[in-house]
Amino acid sequence: MSKKDQRTDAAEEKDREKWMARFQVRLAMQPGVDRAVVLQAVKEVTAHCTDTGEHPRTAYGDPDAYAAQAAARLVLADRATRARQRNAVVEALDSVLKSTGDVPGL
């Protein structure tokens, strides 16, 4: 590999890193986004780019715009998961309370 190719590869890698860094910061600034959402989005982008060899800008466009899109999609899914988990806990507690109500003397 020539030095010119190495410089080009290094420049492309640096550009990928800049895109990912900006995407992560912009995503973290979106309402309702927590660490789990950021990690999920980064994992998705990284996996896609690794599998296809595409640059994230080619695959997803502007990092700011994609951060907003990813947040809208992932925050809703994350909230739905939390709601299901919360409902399961409430149902379990309700079941325990009903069971204790059936015990004489309680």
Image: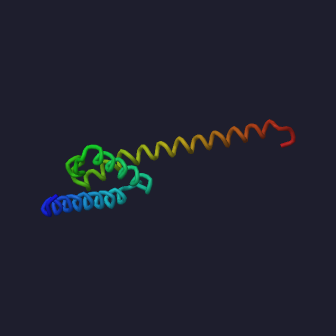
Decide if residue 50 is on the left or right side of residue 92: left
| Residue extending furthest toward the top | 102
Of 39 and 37, nearer the camera is 39
Dividing the picture into quarters, in which one does residue 13 lie? bottom left
Picture coordinates of residue 92, whole percent (x, y): 66, 40
Dividing the picture into quarters, in which one does residue 1 lie? bottom left
Of 105 and 27, nearer the camera is 27
Q: How is the image coloured?
A: rainbow
Picture coordinates of residue 64, whole percent (x, y): 26, 56
| Residue extending furthest toward the right | 105
Decide if residue 12 is on the left or right side of residue 72: left
- As drawn, 99 above or below 58: above
Residue at x 20% of width, y 48% of height: 58
Picture coordinates of residue 59, whole percent (x, y): 23, 46
Q: Quadrant of the C terminus?
A: top right
| Residue extending furthest toward the front | 1
Of 58 and 85, nearer the camera is 58
Of 12 and 33, nearer the camera is 12
